[in-house]
Amino acid sequence: MPIPEDVTGDEIDKDVRQELQSLPKTLAEDVARNLVMVARLLDEDPEGAYGYSRVALRLASRVAAVREAAGFAAYANQKYGEALAEFRAAKRMTGNIDLWPVMADCERGLDRPEKALDMAGAPEVHKLDKAGQVEMRLVAAGARRDLGQLDAAIVTLQSPELAANSVQPWTARLRYAYADALLAAGRESEAREWFAKAVEADRDGSTDASDRLAELDGVEFVDAMAGDADADDQVQAPAAPKADEADVEGENDVEGENHKD
């Protein structure tokens, strides 16, 4: 797969670069460039990221960072069985348990919520850092919802991290999940409160909490671009031509363009 010339491979994390030092220099550079492309495309073009991850995997399947990148690319494309296999391989190679929550979420993706809950109660969870433990709590709550256990999902999300006033990288997502679970359980007023709290914490727009809050408040969104186009049609539509203007009839027609977010 083609890689832009400005991608050198030096963009990768230093820890990954260190892993690649076990490879011949030219091979390490090729793998690094493919890993950079995986990271670049993972959110905006998951299929493209997956393609580059397969190239990296073919070149260096014994490198844990490559297996992890392949796992995330497969996960982004909802290839949960493949993702789980790659995450397990990376975990075996490194002994690192940071991937435990996303492995559990792969079990959910494979319609095995009970297995995800088993993983949520495993000793490995206690070895996770705070962010990992919050992520595991989100996965466990999702598994409860998969099983139709809405009240249990709500209780699962109730935690010191949820109640804390300080804003952490996970705060917005945790509050959002709690609000969504409350709404699913029919507790609309509480859900509105927590969607509002999620908005306060969502500094980078990682959730659509503001839209969900507006929905609960009965706000109806209007496509501003479409409205402008319609207005242009009305303002610029030509009047009936005079006799000496007939040859230029239609020149002032404007075609409105609708915009879809």
Image: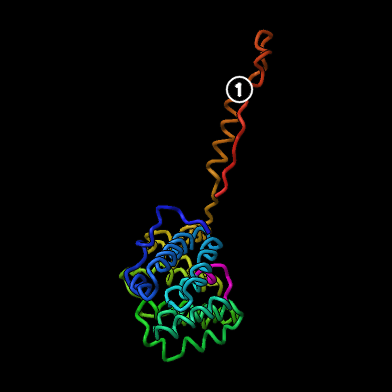
Give the residue at x 56% y 81%.
107
Residue labelled with disc 1: 252
Residue 237 locus on image (x, y percent): 62, 25
Please check the rendered image and state whether residue 248 is part of the magenta-colored stretch, yes or no: no
Secondary structure type for disc 1? loop
- Residue lying at 49% horizontally and 71% vertically, measured from the top left: 59
In the picture as drawn, the residue positioned furthest to the top comes out as: 244
Position of residue 2 relative to residue 23, above or below, is above
Q: Is residue 113 left or right of residue 172?
A: right
- As displayed, is residue 87 above or below residue 33? below
Comparing 8 with 38, the one in front is 8
Whether 122 is drawn above or below 230: the answer is: below
The single residue placed furthest to the bottom in the displayed view is 123
Foreground of the two, 161 or 136: 136
Query: Picture quarter containing residue 64?
Result: bottom left
Q: Position of residue 48 (x, y in %)?
A: 54, 60
Find residue 36 and report its horizontal and vertical position in percent. 42, 62
Question: Closer to the camera, 96 or 27?
Answer: 27
The residue segment tinted magenta is: 73-80
| The quarter of the displayed image where residue 171 is located | bottom left
Magenta span dominant secondary structure: helix
Magenta span includes 78: yes
Q: Is residue 98 visible?
A: yes
For badge 1, the amino acid type reads Asn
Splitting the image into 4 quarters, where does residue 125 fall?
bottom left
